[in-house]
Image: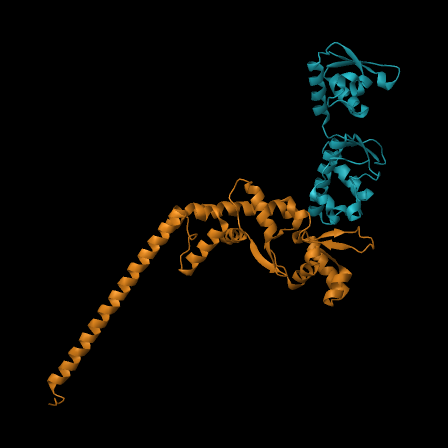
Amino acid sequence: MTAPGFTFPYFHNYPPYFTLQPVKETRDKQIALWGSLVLTYCQHTKTFILDSQAPSPLFVNDAINRKLNTEARIAVLDDLVAQGRAEWLDKSKRQCLILWKRIDEWVAVLLDFVRTYGLSDSVMTLDELSSGDDVRGTDLYGLHHEVLQRMLRVLEAQGKVRTFKGETPGELGIKFV
Amino acid sequence: MRRGPGIAGLQHAVRQKEQFKAAGEEVKKNTLQALQEQLVAFRSSLEEFARRHRSEVRSDPVFRAQFHAMCASVGVDPLSSSKSLWASALGLGDYYYELGVQVVEACLASRSLNGGLMELGALQRAVARRRGTSAEPVSQDDVVRAIKKLRVLGGGFELLSIGGRSFVRSVPGELNTDKNTAIEAAGSRGFTSVPELSVAKGWPQGRAESVLQALTLEGLAWVDDGAPDRVRLYWFPCLGGAAQEAA
């Protein structure tokens, strides 16, 4: 996975940032910088699920021969989870859902889309919402089902959508009320 | 005709002495007066000069440094008080107060990255970035002056020189000779290690190790375990590299 057009911040070229710092104040700053890099990088590459052990250029800089080890990656992602900007999808902390937009921000994008295209009262499937022709060219295109399902839970609780089971999870029907 | 040492002769000598003294005092008074007049004239023409060149003094760092040098050579301090005529003529007092605030901000913003030790050039660039591109340029001389004004506040801002480079320290605390030596050994590469430092300075390993650990605790050094030979490197963000550009 490469990232054309993405400019890494200054610290990505500075070797000590790839070692988890032993002093707390320094480490806090280090983790905060890495956390915001994870968010901007995932937004740029439209990455929703980050594999904490994959050799992503996010965590590896071959030019200076440094890579962030698993312990440090997990520390960075744990911090994002604590801020509500990420969620672990497994107990072994390998797959991490990255919320470069928070769920409520995504909900706002979806409601805006529904209003703009006059889709109230119509029914769409989960697949159509994330990869159908209607969403092509919008922020919703390519939206991961894990995110969509979390959004629907919020919207259902607010009574703004009704869902109908389909034959496959992707065919879940959604009616905007 | 020879006049003997009579009463008249003695009186004459006393009179003569008094006359000389009076004449001397007259001359002294005149010189002092002339000097005072000259000083007043000089002062007013310096003020006149300052007023006329106010914009240059404010906008051109080189000119400002020369102006400061000129003032220093005649014993005038245009920064001594914001209430002085100088401040009102030049507005320099405010200028350095404002710069001082920006220096403090730049130092605080980068403190967790560099442990409060910042190279003067990097601080100058950070301050310039804070002022924005449209602001008048700031020279290192200006930054140094602003830091000297900050001392009044007792905030522990100090200038120090390590290995021929100037640094600004924004957290109170002493850099002992060993710490200075370690930072100096890291030099322009920006890092060193326990074995390297002990060989270079002829120190036992333990001495090098304790110095580098102390520097790490203070946030002045960052450890790096990613080197190919697995020897832990200690990097100094204040020596350059990427970290200081964050401020």
B21 relative position to A78: left or right: left
**Residue in the foreground of this view, choosing between A90 and B94:** B94
Report x, y in % for residue B215.
69, 56
Please name the residue shown 56% across and 45% down the image.
Answer: B128
**Residue in the foreground of this view, choosing between B91 and B112:** B91
Report x, y in % for residue B118.
62, 52
Q: On screen, B105 above or below A119?
A: below
Report x, y in % for residue B238.
65, 52
B140 relative position to A114: left or right: left
Please name the residue shown 70% across and 41% down the image.
Answer: A9
Image-quadrant location for residue B178: bottom right
Q: Which chain is cyan?
A: A
Q: On screen, B247 above or below B211?
A: above
Residue B237, can we see it?
yes
Display colour for chain B:
orange
Residue B171, can we see it?
no
**Residue in the foreground of this view, choosing between B9 and A28:** B9
B190 relative position to B129: left or right: right
In the rendered image, the quadrant that contains the N terminus of chain B is: bottom left
B122 relative position to A28: left or right: left
